[in-house]
Amino acid sequence: MDLLLSTHTIMKCNLKNSWIQKSTALGLLFLMGLTQMSHASLLDEVQVYTDDINEVGEWGLELHLNRTPKGNLQASYIGEKVNAGATRLTPEISFGLSRTLEAGLYLPLVQGVDGKMELAGQKWRLKWLPLKAEQNQGWFAGLNTEFSQLKYAFSDSTRSVEVRTILGWKNEDWLLATNPVFGWSVSKGYAHQSPDFTLGLKVAKRWTQDSSFGFEYYNGTGRLNEIQPNALQDRTLYIVWDHEAEPLRFNLGIGKGMNANSDAWTLKSIIEVPF
C-alpha cells in the first residue's frame, strides 16, 4: 500500500514538473516570437523613390516631418524607443554628382513622448538612376544604397546597409512605382544574417496640372530566410497628395496600419525647401 502511495505521489510530481516545463517552454517561445516580430523601424523617411534626381552640381534640401499619434507600444527589443507618440524631423541634404548619380545625407531628429528632442544618428546615401522617364513618359529604374549609423535606442544594430531597388512607369496622368528594399545589419554579431525585406508601392493619378493623389503601401516582412506571418508583419497603407508647383513642393500622407502589429495611425510629409 505504501509503495502504491509513493508511486502515485511520484507520478503527480512528474506530471506537475512536466506541466511546468511545458509552460516554461511555451513562455520562452512566446517571448522569442515577440523579439522576432516585424516592427516598424525608425520612420525618419516614409517615401517610395521614383525618378527624381538632382541636376549635376545642384544642391537639394527636403524636410521629412512625420508623427505617430497612435502606434504599437510593444518594443521589438529591450531599450527600443517605439514610434508611438513620437514626432520625427529629418533634414535631407542632396547633391547631384552626375546625370545618373546623386549623394544624400539624412540627419534624423526625434522628439519622444517625454518631449525631448535628440539626434538619432545619420544616414548617407547614393542614388544611381541609369534609366529615366524622358519628358515624363515611360519607364525608370535604379538603385539607392544607404549606410546608417543610429543610436541603439532606434536600432538594435547601430550600423546597417540598405539597398533599395527603384522601378516604375509614368505618363502625364499616372505614376506607378515600386521599391523592393533589402537591409543588412552590419554591427558586430549581425554581419552574416539574412537581410530584412520591405516592399514599397505607389500609385498616383494626376488631377490638376500641379497635384496628384494616390496610395502608398509599405510592407515589412522580416528576414528573407524567415518571413513572418501576415499578422506579425508591418503593413501600412497611406493616402497621399503630391503638389509639384513652385515655390512649394510637398508630399502629404496619412497612413493606417493594416494589422495589430503595425502603428495604427501615422502622419507623414516631405517638404522641398527652395534655395
Image (tube, grey):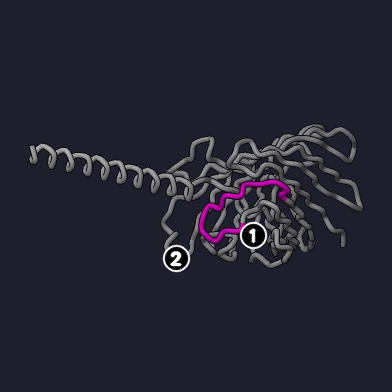
x then y, percent, for residue 76: 53, 52
Q: Quadrant of residue 95?
A: bottom right
> In terms of depth relative to the viewer, which is nearer, 50 or 237?
237
x then y, percent, for residue 249: 85, 50
Left or right: residue 227 compared with residue 127? left
Magenta span: helix, strand or loop, mainly?
A: loop
> In terms of depth relative to the viewer, which is nearer, 23 or 77?
23
Query: In 3D space, how far apart are the residues under numbered discs 2 and 1 (Cα atoms)?
Result: 22 Å
Q: Secondary structure at mark 1?
A: strand
Please say if 86 is above or below 177.
below
Q: Residue furthest front?
A: 1
Query: Which label sits in the foreground, 2 or 1?
Result: 2
Residue at the spot 55% in from the left edge and 58% down from the top edge: 161
- What residue type is disc 2 on? Lys
Residue at the spot 82% in from the left edge and 42% down from the top edge: 242
> In terms of depth relative to the viewer, which is nearer, 64 or 38?
38
Q: Can residue 185 be seen from the camera position used here? A: yes
Q: Secondary structure at mark 2?
A: loop
Q: Quadrant of residue 124?
A: bottom right
- Extent of the magenta region: 68-81
Disc number placed over residue 125 in the picture, else none: 1
Label 2 sits on residue: 188
Residue at the spot 78% in from the left edge and 57% down from the top edge: 62
Disc number placed over residue 219 in the picture, else none: none
x then y, percent, for residue 275: 87, 62
